[in-house]
Image: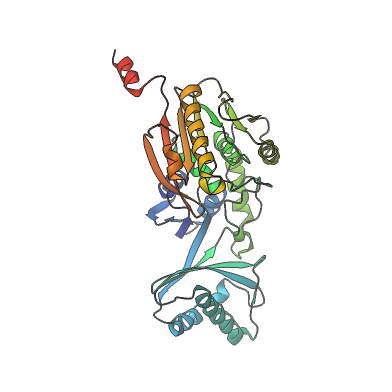
C-alpha cells in the first residue's frame, strides 16, 4: 500500500480555483488553495496522475525538507544536516531552481549557492566525492522556496514546465501560454456541449487546448520526459498503468472547433502546430478578419486573445477592439464570448458591457478575462421577450 505525502501544484495567479477542481476530480486529498499554487496529498500514483492529467498546473513539487533560517550561516548549517544522499547520488548531478521573497535573504542567487554548497560539502565529507551541477539535464531538480525565514526544499517531479506540452513547435508574436489557455477554457464553464471558435487564433494554442479538452486527451499526451522518471523510487509499472487508463478515456467530440486569423503566417503556424498534435481533422482553420469570418452554425463559445497595446499603435488597437465589438454584436449574437487582454483601455472600446471580469496573469502580464453575453437586440429586450 502506497503512503500519502504532501504535494504542491504550482499555477498562474487566477487559476487556483480551476486547479482545485481538477485535483478534486483526480481524487486528491487535503486540498488547500495557496497563492499561485494548490497544496494536496497523495501517493506516487497521484503524483504521476497530477503530472500527466492536470491542465492548469505548471509543475508538481514534492516537499522534502522544511525549516527556519534567520541568516546565511543557519541556512547553510541546516541544509548540511539533511540526508541528501537519500535523493542525490554522490557521483550524480542536480540543479536548484529558487524562489526567494525575504528581507533576510536579499540575494536569491546567493541563497541558492549556499544551499548548493551545503549539499555538496555534506556529500564530500560522507563519500569523499561530490555531485556535480547540471542545468541542462539534471538527475534531480531541487526547488528552493524561501519566504522570510521559512525555507522549503522540494523535489520538482515535472522537470520542464508543464505548459511545454510538446505540440507547439512554432509560435507567432506573444502567444498565449498553454496552461493559461487551458485555464481560460475551464473558467468559461464550457461543458463541451457547443461549438468552440477563436476568431483571432494566432498560432492555435486556444484551439488545440479546446480540442484536447473536448476529446479528453490528457494534458501531457504528447510529452515523454518527466523529472520523476529519474528518481530511485520511480515505478514504470504504475506509470504505465496511469497513462494507459487515461488514454483509454479519450473520446470523440460531436461539435465544431474553428479558428480564423487575418495573418497568413499565423494560419501556417497554427496548421503546423495542429498537425503536430494530430488534431487536423478536429479543427478547421480560415484565413479571414474578425468582421468577415462567420462563426460555426449553432450554439458556439467564443474565446479569443487579441493583440495587446504594447504590440500596436494606440489608434490601431482601439479600432481593432471596436471591430471585435462590432463582430460580436452583428455576427455572434445568441452566443457567449470571452476576451483576454492586458490592455484595459482597449477593452473599453469593445463597446459592450462584460457580465464578468476575472483577473489572470498570462506569464507576467496582468490581464482581464471578460465575458460578454451576446443577445439579438438589447439585453432589456431579451428579458422582455423571456417574460412574455
Residue at x-position 43% and y-position 52%: 13
Residue 219 is left or right of residue 347, and the answer is right
Whether residue 369 appears in this view of the structure is: yes
- Measured as percent of width and height from the top left, residue 358 is found at 40, 43
- Measured as percent of width and height from the top left, residue 227 is found at 61, 60
Q: Residue furthest top?
A: 388
Decide which of 164, 47 is in the foreground and name it.
164
Image quadrant in which you'd find residue 117: bottom right
- Measured as percent of width and height from the top left, residue 214 is found at 55, 34
Decide which of 322, 331 is in the foreground and name it.
322
Residue 250 is left or right of residue 268, and the answer is left
Give the colouring mode of the picture: rainbow
- Is 187 above or below relative to 256? below
Decide which of 229, 172 is in the foreground and name it.
172
Residue at x-position 64% and y-position 55%: 236
- Is 339 above or below relative to 388? below
- Measured as percent of width and height from the top left, residue 269 is found at 69, 41
Q: Residue furthest front?
A: 315
- Is 176 above or below relative to 5? above
Amino acid at each position: 500500500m502506497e503512503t500519502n505525502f504532501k504535494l504542491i501544484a504550482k499555477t498562474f495567479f487566477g487559476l487556483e480555483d480551476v486547479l482545485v477542481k481538477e485535483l478534486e476530480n483526480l481524487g486528491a486529498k487535503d486540498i488547500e488553495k495557496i497563492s499561485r499554487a494548490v497544496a494536496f496529498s497523495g501517493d506516487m500514483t497521484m503524483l504521476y496522475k497530477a503530472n500527466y492529467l492536470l491542465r492548469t498546473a505548471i509543475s508538481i513539487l514534492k516537499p522534502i525538507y522544511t525549516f527556519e533560517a534567520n541568516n546565511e550561516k543557519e541556512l547553510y548549517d541546516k541544509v548540511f544536516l539533511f540526508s541528501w544522499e537519500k535523493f542525490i547520488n554522490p557521483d550524480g548531478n542536480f540543479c536548484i531552481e529558487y524562489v526567494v521573497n525575504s528581507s533576510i535573504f536579499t540575494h536569491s542567487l546567493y541563497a541558492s549557492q549556499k544551499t548548493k554548497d551545503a549539499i555538496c560539502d555534506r556529500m564530500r565529507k560522507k563519500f569523499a566525492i561530490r555531485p556535480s551541477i547540471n542545468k541542462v539535464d539534471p538527475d534531480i531538480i531541487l526547488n528552493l522556496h524561501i519566504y522570510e525565514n521559512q525555507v522549503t526544499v522540494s523535489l520538482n517531479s515535472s522537470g520542464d514546465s508543464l505548459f511545454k506540452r510538446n505540440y507547439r513547435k512554432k509560435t507567432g508574436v506573444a502567444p498565449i501560454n498553454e496552461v493559461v489557455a487551458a485555464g481560460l477554457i475551464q473558467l468559461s464553464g464550457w461543458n463541451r456541449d457547443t461549438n468552440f471558435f477563436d476568431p483571432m487564433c494566432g498560432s492555435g494554442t486556444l484551439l488545440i487546448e479546446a480540442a484536447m479538452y473536448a476529446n479528453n486527451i490528457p494534458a501531457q499526451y504528447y510529452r515523454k520526459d518527466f523529472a520523476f522518471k529519474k528518481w530511485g523510487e520511480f515505478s514504470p509499472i504504475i506509470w504505465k498503468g496511469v497513462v494507459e487508463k487515461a488514454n483509454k478515456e479519450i473520446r470523440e467530440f460531436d461539435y465544431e472547433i474553428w479558428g480564423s486569423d487575418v495573418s497568413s503566417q499565423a494560419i501556417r503556424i497554427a496548421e503546423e502546430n495542429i498537425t503536430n498534435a494530430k488534431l487536423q481533422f478536429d479543427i478547421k482553420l480560415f484565413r479571414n478578419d474578425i468582421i468577415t469570418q462567420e462563426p460555426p452554425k449553432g450554439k458556439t463559445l467564443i474565446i479569443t486573445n487579441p493583440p495587446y497595446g504594447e504590440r500596436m499603435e494606440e489608434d490601431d488597437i482601439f479600432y481593432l477592439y471596436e471591430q471585435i465589438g462590432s463582430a460580436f454584436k452583428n455576427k455572434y449574437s445568441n452566443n457567449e464570448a470571452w476576451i483576454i487582454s492586458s490592455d484595459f483601455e482597449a477593452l473599453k472600446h469593445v463597446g459592450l458591457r462584460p457580465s464578468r471580469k476575472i483577473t489572470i496573469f498570462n506569464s507576467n502580464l496582468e490581464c482581464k478575462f471578460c465575458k460578454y453575453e451576446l443577445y439579438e437586440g438589447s439585453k432589456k429586450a431579451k428579458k422582455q421577450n423571456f417574460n412574455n
